[in-house]
Amino acid sequence: QVQLVESGGGLVQPGGSLRLSCAASIRLFSLYAMAWYRQAPGKQRELVADISSDATTNYADSVKGRFTISRVNAKNTVYLQMNSLKPEDTAVYYCNADHVRFGDYWGQGTQVTVSS
């Protein structure tokens, strides 16, 4: 059974940093495209960043230069390093694993709150 478990969320002051982790119990993890999405109250879920199986990355304009997505295939883990956090980054952050043949999977989410 596929399971994605996010961790690392919490409360941080504006300008601070957090690193989110997503541990995946999934066969052939290295073949999956991995992504981080977020959903703020009253808003639609949006893509934050993704990383392909060959480590090509893509970022939402709102986080470019501040967030970095990475993966360690040997650990079945994807990370999201978030720097210079702003109040508008407050949301539940979700990990996603996607493969055209093997399916699309979501974690349960981790809350990130940026507030003074």
Image: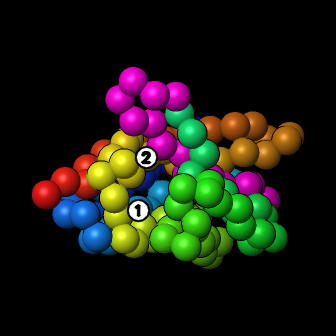
Q: CA distance from mark 1 to mark 2?
A: 9 Å
Range of magenta residues: 30-44
Specify how the rendered protein is coloured: rainbow
Q: Position of residue 19 (x, y in %)?
A: 38, 68
Question: Residue at position x 62%, y 54% from top?
Answer: 60
Question: Please, is residue 74 above or below residue 62 in the view?
Answer: below
Q: Around disc 1, counting alpha carbons within 10 Å, would you say few (fewer than 14), some (14 to 19), or many (20 or more)?
A: many
Tell me which amino acid carries mark 2. Answer: Tyr
| Horizontal relation, residue 3 to residue 13: left or right | right
Q: Position of residue 106 (x, y in %)?
A: 55, 39
Depth order, front residue of 83/37? 83
Question: Residue at position x 77%, y 69% from top?
Answer: 56
User: Is residue 28 something that shows in the picture?
Assistant: no
Pick out the residue farthest to the right.
101
Depth order, front residue of 36/40? 40
Question: Residue at position x 52%, y 28% from top?
Answer: 44
Q: Which residue is mark 1?
A: 20
Q: Which residue is mark 2?
A: 93
Tell me which amino acid carries mark 1. Answer: Leu
